[in-house]
Structure formats: C-alpha cells, structure tokens
Image: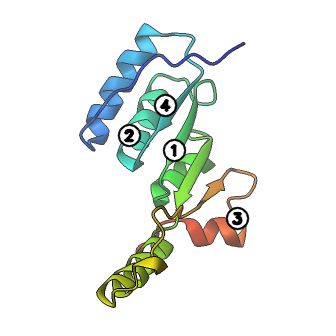
Amino acid sequence: GAVQLIGMDYNDDNAAKAAEQTAAVLSAHPDLGGIFGTNLFSARGAAQAVANAGLTGVVKVANFDAPEDAIVALRENVVDIVIAQHPYEMGEKCIEFAVAAVNGNFDAIPKRYPTGYTIITRENVDTEEAQRSIYKSE
C-alpha cells in the first residue's frame, strides 16, 4: 500500500523527549511501519522507544547522522538504515568558499552545494566506505 505520513514531532535535540514522543506515536498508531529520525537525537530517542515497546524489527527506524551508537543500534537490529553526512567535506568546502569570498572570487562559490551522504546498512557497515563515514572521536 501507499505510505502515509502521520506527522512530525520536534524534540529540541533531546533524545529523552524524542523517546517519549515516539512512545506516544507507537501507542496511537499500532500499525506504524517506520520512523525517520532527522538527526542523531531524534533517531536515538526513536530507536530507544521502538526497542522499549518490543517492536525492534517490526517498526523500521531510519537514522540521519552516524554517531558510533547509531552503528551499535544498526548492528543490534534496532535501527535499519543510517544516513551519514560528510562533515569533513562540509568543513573543507566552508573553508574553501570562505577563502574565495575573502579574495572577492564570488564566482567560485556555488549558490548551492550538495555535500553528499553515505547510506549505511547491516549489509555494508563493515565496508571501508561505511566505516570512513561513521562519526568517530579520536
């Protein structure tokens, strides 16, 4: 069948609030098929609520942002997909565009610059590309 959006919740970047909101949505919509957490706090809270409800593997969780705990959740089947941004590339491009601006070379700065992403699944999590995309503190 068709996918139906049932709503959005804003959690002020608070994983505990996201977990509460998700628990309420799971209660109100027992046939919910999936959740998209638009940042690491949203996804962390959503995944926790899904696990707490005993719905791991039933309610699919897509996670935007790739901290190491998201990869643990992926391996534990709590999260089904992790979309990793490329923060190094973002920083690199910001510096490049800032230098161009300081030098008055505005034509070198695109109006929009898509930074790309890596989709991490259980099938590819151990590949070099996926491992390179996980946010790790060194």
C-alpha distance separating marks 1 and 4: 14 Å
Q: Is residue 48 above or below residue 29?
A: below
What color scheme is it?
A: rainbow
Q: Toward which corner of the image does residue 52 lie, by quadrant?
A: top left
Residue 42 is tagged as 2
Q: Earlier in the sequence, mark 4 or mark 2?
A: 2
The residue tagged 1 is 63
Q: Nearer the viewer, mark 4 or mark 3?
A: 3
Q: Is residue 21 left or right of residue 110?
A: left
The quarter holding residue 119 reads bottom right
Which is nearer the eye, 7 or 20? 7
Q: Residue 21 appears in which quarter of the rendering?
A: top left
> Are the two marked residues, 3 and 1, in contact with CB atoms closer than 8 angstroms?
no
Instruction: Give the mark nearest the N terminus, 1 or 4.
Output: 4
Q: Which mark is residue 51?
A: 4
Residue placed most toward the observer, 38 or 18: 38
Secondary structure of residue under mark 1: strand
Q: Nearer the viewer, mark 1 or mark 4?
A: 1
Earlier sequence position, callout 1 versus callout 2: 2
The x and y percentages for residue 33 are 60, 21
For residue 126, which numbered disc appears in the image? 3
The mark nearer the N terminus, 2 or 3, is 2
The local secondary structure at tag 4 comes to: helix
Compute the Cα span from label 4 to label 2.
Answer: 14 Å
Residue at 72% over, 67% down: 127
Tell me which numbered mark, 3 or 1, is placed earlier along the sequence: 1
Indicate the position of residue 24 as horizontal and vertical percent values: 35, 16
| Distance in Å between CA atoms under marks 4 and 3 | 23 Å
Q: Height in image: 30 above or below 60?
A: above
Q: Check disc 3 and give the amino acid type.
A: Asp
Amino acid residing under circle 2: Ser
